[in-house]
Amino acid sequence: MAVEEVGEVTEVATGVVTEAGTATGLEAEAETLAAADVLYPIAPGYRVNVRSGPGTNYTVVRTLPYNARVPINCQKPGQSVSGPYGTSKLWDNIANGEFVSDAYVKTGSDGYVAPRCA
């Protein structure tokens, strides 16, 4: 059987996998970076408030412009919010100390699409 190489080959350093099967070290960092590479669209026609925590009682840090796309670094449960994509208790961490309600982010899922925030 012949094997052809197509495109560019990238060498990836691997970390250590614990007995429980979870990645640590470089492997975990690579997974986090890969997840952050995906940008999810904010619901069309909405300027969404970015908050300092997972609820509307947290301070507004900034407001996203129309047609914004955001990374989801991790997700955590918080205040329930109703939006164009349903009602959700999930909040998406889009940057350090910045959260938006998952009810305004088109993830294609009603559940977690990223790791849970620590």
Image: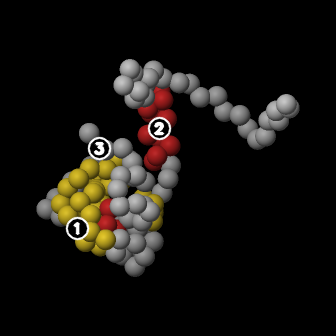
For disc 1, the marked residue is 81
The secondary element bearing badge 2 is classed as helix
Q: Quadrant of the N terminus?
A: top right
Q: Residue furthest front?
A: 1
- Residue drawn at the location 82% of the way across and 35% of the way down: 4
- In this view, 110 is above or below 86: above
- In this view, 100 is above or below 36: below
Whole-percent x and y of residue 109? 40, 60
Q: 116 or 94: nearer the eye?
A: 116
Q: CA distance from mark 3 to mark 2?
A: 14 Å
For disc 2, the marked residue is 31
Asked if labels 1 and 2 touch by Cβ distance under 8 angstroms, the answer is no
Three-letter amino acid code of the residue under disc 1: Val
Three-letter amino acid code of the residue under disc 2: Glu
Q: Is residue 24 left or right of residue 57?
A: right
Q: Is residue 43 left or right of residue 88?
A: right
- Residue drawn at the location 20% of the way across and 56% of the way down: 78
The secondary element bearing badge 1 is classed as strand
Three-letter amino acid code of the residue under disc 3: Cys
Q: Earlier in the sequence, mark 1 or mark 3?
A: 1
Q: CA distance from mark 2 to mark 1?
A: 29 Å
Q: Residue furthest right?
A: 2
Q: Quadrant of the C terminus?
A: top left
Residue 117: which numbered mark, if any? 3
Q: Quadrant of residue 70?
A: bottom left
Q: Quadrant of residue 85?
A: bottom left
**What colouring method underlies this structural image?**
secondary structure
Whole-percent x and y of residue 18? 39, 21
